[in-house]
Structure formats: C-alpha cells, structure tokens
Amino acid sequence: MWYPDAMVRRSDDDALAADWHQLMGRYQRLMCALDRELASHDLTASEFEVLQQLELSDDCSLRMSALAESAHLTQSALSRLVSRLERDGLLERKACEQDRRSQYVSLTAAGRSRYAEARPTQRKVLREEGSDCLVGRAG
Amino acid sequence: MWYPDAMVRRSDDDALAADWHQLMGRYQRLMCALDRELASHDLTASEFEVLQQLELSDDCSLRMSALAESAHLTQSALSRLVSRLERDGLLERKACEQDRRSQYVSLTAAGRSRYAEARPTQRKVLREEGSDCLVGRAG
DNA sequence: ACGAGTCTTATGCATATGCATCTAATGCGC
DNA sequence: GCGCATTAGATGCATATGCATAAGACTCGT
C-alpha cells in the first residue's frame, strides 16, 4: 500500500514515537541505576563504558575519535571524560607518531583493575534492572 | 543447565552488556538528533516529551508525579522543566483542591499549538534516524 | 488533638553535556 | 613550496540533570 510523502500513515509515525518513548524509558532507568551503583567505584556509567571499550580493544589503546565512536560519546564529552580519568590515573594519553593531531588513549594498570572491580557491579545492575528490557534484544 | 550465583554464565552477562551498549548507542544518536532539530521550535526532546504526554492525557492535565513517571523524568528534572515551560507560557500549574501538596499541570493553547508545530519535526527525525533501530521493536 | 512518619514538590549544589569555536597538524592541488 | 580545505582534539559558555535535602501537607494511631 502506498502513501504520499506528506501523508505518511499516522499509525506508522505513532508506532515509531511509541518505540522511542519506550527506548527513553529503558535508557533512563538503566542509566540512573548504573550511575547510582557505579558511584561506589567512583565511576559514572559513561566512564565505565570508556574503560570497557579500551579493555575490549586489541592493545587496550584507541585513538580519541575511535573511542568516542565506540563509547557513543560526543567528541567534546570524551575529551573531558578522558581528562578526568587521566587525572585519576586510570588511563593515559600518548602522542601518535604518525599524526601529531591524534592522541592514543590507553588503560593503565590502575584503570584495568578499576574496571575489573566495577564490572561485577555493572553486570549485577544489568541483570536486576535490565533483564526485562534487554534480554533477547541483542539480535 | 545450572550455574552457581557467584558464577553466572559469562556469555549471559556479556550478552546483557552488549544489549545495553546497543541501547546506549540508539538513545544517544536519536536524542542528539531530536535536540538539534527540535531547537528550531525552541524545545528540547524532554520538553517535547512532556508536551506530548500532556496532549495524550485525558484532559491535557496531569499531576506532577504522574507526569514525571510518564515522561521518564526525575522528579527534580520535571519540576524545573515545568518551570521553564510555564515561564514560556506553554503550560500552567494549577493547585489541586483535594491535596494541596499536589499540582496539576495542563497545556495552554500556546502549548498545544507549539506541540502541533513540533510534532512533524520530531516524527521526521524518528523516521530518518530511527527507522533502523526502532521499527519492529514496539512488541 | 497531637506527633511520628509519609508523601509531594521545590531548590542548593555539583557536575556532565552539547554546540560553537579555536588551534594545530595534515593533505591536496597547483 | 605555498595556500586552502579538512581533520583531531581542547575549551568557553550555557544549560539540563541527579542527589540530597528542605518545607509544607496529609495520615494514622493513640
């Protein structure tokens, strides 16, 4: 069945809006719970995510832009977040030889162990708060 | 197959984490796009959501607590958000007769028309940015 | 009727975030 | 080699947010 551009079927749009509404709900609930619980490890959910992406990377090291991409953060948000974690000794910036505009970010030993400590907490929250809204959606 | 509490199957936890990672990505991308586009109507995505929940309510009026719940916002976030929209004349607080702790929030005419103006923009963003990560997930 | 406990909303404070912009470095055409 | 466009990352600024708490209103037991 066909519809002109200017008259997209109302129900399609509304289904999309309903999905988005649901997505917001899941995100807010999980994000708040994670921030609250991870606070005991002095980490926010975003910070944890950055540590995790580094841990999962080949040599625990990524370029800023790649890290921003994989942690779903803005370039500016990542820049500041990395500054915080660097100040706390959890990771370090290293200049890139090939392109002196770029920086490599890598986990320190402290960063790896902080991540190891925090991971069970994060997983517990995901199990407790997210089992009804995450499981089976990995596709 | 059975696993002791302290040793939940690694793959289950990791699947949950992968789902959460994906959820974050979808949320961030859509939220940013919505904020950017809705700015042309002087609205944030959260503000739009509040207007929408009011519009969808029976008499365009809800108690603060109910509104916070249905818009997926913290009580404090909603309180300030409502103050902003009230200052802009898009909605108004009304005292509740039965319980003088409570407030009713209701759309003004300006609020309803602002919502009507903004909705096509929001729907357009959902269609363009969200078609690949929302459709079919309404359940 | 009084007081303890609960609920509803507002607010002080600290902070994370996005956008716009800036600087420095790189690449590309000529 | 020299400009010009592009790219990487840092930062000024304004703002939205969460947590903790405050203040006022309600409830219920005694």
Image (cartoon, coloured by chain):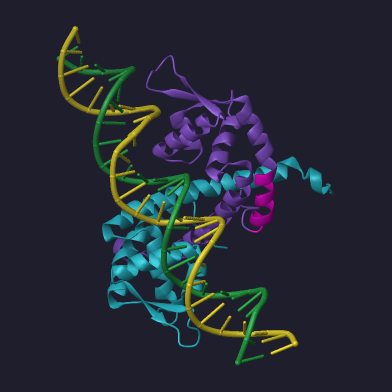
Chain colours: A cyan, B purple, C yellow, D green
Nearer-the-camera pick, B100 or A115? B100
Q: Is residue B99 above or below residue B75?
A: above
Q: Main secondary structure of the magenta part?
A: helix
> In the image, is residue A33 above or below residue D8?
above
At 39% across and 68% down in the image, what residue appears? A82
> Could you say where residue B7 lies in the image, as x and y percent from the top left?
32, 66
User: In this orientation, which residue lies closer to the viewer: B135 or C22?
Assistant: C22
Relative depth, front residue between B37 and A115: B37
Q: Report x, y in % for residue B61.
A: 54, 25
The percent position of residue C19, horizontal first and vertical second, equals 56, 56
Instruction: Kindly tell me whether residue A132 is visible in this rendering.
Output: no
At x 50%, y 84%, the residue is A99
Please provide percent x and percent y for residue B131. 67, 55
Q: Is residue B91 left or right of residue A52?
A: right
Q: Classify residue A34 by image quadrant.
A: bottom left
Q: Which residues are magenta?
A: B121-132
Residue at the spot 46% in from the left edge and 41% down from the top edge: B73
Reply above or below: A79 against A23. below
From the viewer's perspective, tell me whether residue A88 is left or right of residue B89.
left
Q: Is residue C26 left or right of residue B20?
A: right
At horizontal 54% and vertical 32% (from top left) the residue drawn is B88
Taking the image as shown, residue A95 lies to the left or right of residue A8, namely left
Q: Is residue A33 magenta?
A: no
